[in-house]
Amino acid sequence: MNEPLIGAVEAGGTKFVLAVARMDGTIVERVRMDTRTPTETFPEMAAFFAQHDLAGIGIASFGPIDIDPASPAYGTFTTTPKPGWSGARFHDALGGLGAPILVDTDVNGAALGEWLSGAGQGCETLAYTTVGTGIGTGVLHKGASRGGISHLEAGHIRPPRDPARDPFTGRCPFHGDCLEGLASGPAISDRWGASLDEFSASEPDAVPLIASYLADFAVTLVLMHMPDRLIFGGGVMKAPGLLGSLRQQAEARLEGYVQHPRLDPGLATYITAPGLGDDAGITGALELARRASGQGRD
Amino acid sequence: MNEPLIGAVEAGGTKFVLAVARMDGTIVERVRMDTRTPTETFPEMAAFFAQHDLAGIGIASFGPIDIDPASPAYGTFTTTPKPGWSGARFHDALGGLGAPILVDTDVNGAALGEWLSGAGQGCETLAYTTVGTGIGTGVLHKGASRGGISHLEAGHIRPPRDPARDPFTGRCPFHGDCLEGLASGPAISDRWGASLDEFSASEPDAVPLIASYLADFAVTLVLMHMPDRLIFGGGVMKAPGLLGSLRQQAEARLEGYVQHPRLDPGLATYITAPGLGDDAGITGALELARRASGQGRD
């Protein structure tokens, strides 16, 4: 009998990453697909996994999506504005393979990956935030993602905004100037007609402004979850100087209110980049697959 | 042999409530003491409990306080500005009684009480907020309080403030216009020279303004913890119209983003007053005592 294999999906708004791996995480096969509609993307995904006999499948997906294993709609996209995806269900596409399936959000998956083998190792409470097309945070406590009647929607909180400094009123279709409406990649493009990378050299105020929103958010995460560490990943975070400015402004706003050895001077180890780079999500999805198969670390 | 008794402390900044009860919660004796310095208050507290043979002691206390059972400083007040209390430790006062001790925050204790026998019954995830001398929130998930490197400090997040509508710059010694700096009882007194009760009749904008900060906070709690229910207690919440305005503004700001049967139209059952009134804290402290004795519900 062959060693059992597991399957993992990192489902994003623009691409799906699929992997088949051994239990120890060694990847046997890995592909990348463009995200189209579920009618096109789901059969292609299923065909890839059908080549293997899988002991479990783990999925770290964009949302909003039902991630309550006790819900009849477990694995179903809910109110996403992405055309065609609302109501699509992973189990409809993959249930026929016969492998147990675990589904969590993309950021919860990334938090799990970083906790297992990235910058979150040894953290009891870990917050992983992605700043890209959207903004979202997964909070992991003792290896389990925090949520309630839904997964968290932290990216939609509303930071203070000074219209004199930033007249941009935000682009979130639900809330206007929530964090995602102000500091996501599309918000940056809408405001300045360029990415933060392209814009930061000619406009020195851009990085500190975006960092100010993210710093306010980091402080809110601290006060609301008290993590051991905050990881900030995603495309926007690659802009030079952004992470440093975020650390500096977050430290200034905390004003010593939270005192703990984890909060080092300058927050250089407290607020960090991902250790796994862009592999955090698929690493977490593999752990979900391992858990689905009954072999997870927790 | 007599039925075992348990002891409970609800430790507030102005008063301590002490209770001795049977395991089923029936209170045998209950007293109230003014909070002075620990040198005065602690011996009086210890003398009260020394009259009984206790199987466990539960404490729901103001903070900041170390609530990590694994910490050598478990039960010790940390950076509180309250004169004399920083460094005081419940275990120094009560350890001699020989009963196991569990310590949590006042709001975590109140959340626990409401979850067991108040407005939070049946909730998997429950947020209990007090709006009084300070503002704090306890979040309970499956009967355990959420925290990390410390208990939560949710009352210190910074809501958006429009200086044209509210020129008051806040009174938090750490953060100025954080939620507690803007909407606590002392912030209301500083701003208007009166309590919200006294002021609301002559100044119709007062209640909606305070409610707007609390509504922003409620939305942040939803997005950050996804509770089944939000309970708002504390002295300030007794102002007529405040809870209704909070519900209305929170619903408007959520704009349908979170859809779940728990969020009823008008949020009348989603955002509620405590079911136990002012007894939530001592009820939770009794459950902590029960847990300390090994007889807790969880």
Image (spheres, coloured by chain):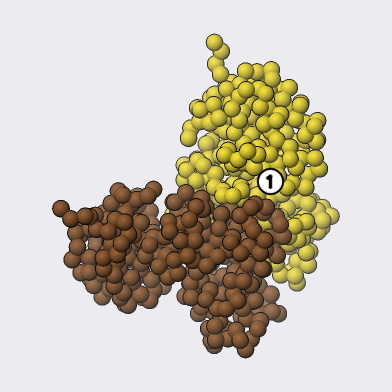
Chain colours: A yellow, B brown
Single out the residue that lies furthest toward the right: A193
Number of marks drawn: 1
Going 48% across and 32% down the picture, which residue do you hit?
Answer: A297
Q: Residue furthest left?
A: B1
- The residue under the point 27% across, 59% down is B22
Q: Residues within 10 Å of mark 1 (few under 14, many from 20)?
A: many
**Residue drawn at x 38%, y 62% as measured from the top left:** B283
Give x and y (percent) for residue A114: 56, 40
Rendering coords of residue A187 (x, y %): 77, 55
Give the camera-side residue of B163 and A93: A93
Q: A48 above or below A112?
A: above
Secondary structure of the residue carrying tag 1 is loop
Q: Does residue B208 lie above or below A149 as drawn? A: below
**Chain under label 1?**
A
Q: Say above or below: B87 vs B115.
A: below
Residue found at x 51% / y 71%: B131
Whether residue A256 appears in this view of the structure is no
Q: Quadrant of residue B103 in the image?
A: bottom left
Front-most of residues B41 and A281: B41
Read off the residue under disc 1.
Answer: A64
Occupied quadrant, residue B81: bottom left
Three-letter residue code for mark 1: Pro
Q: Position of residue A292 (x, y in %)?
A: 55, 30
- State which quadrant residue A47 falls in: top right
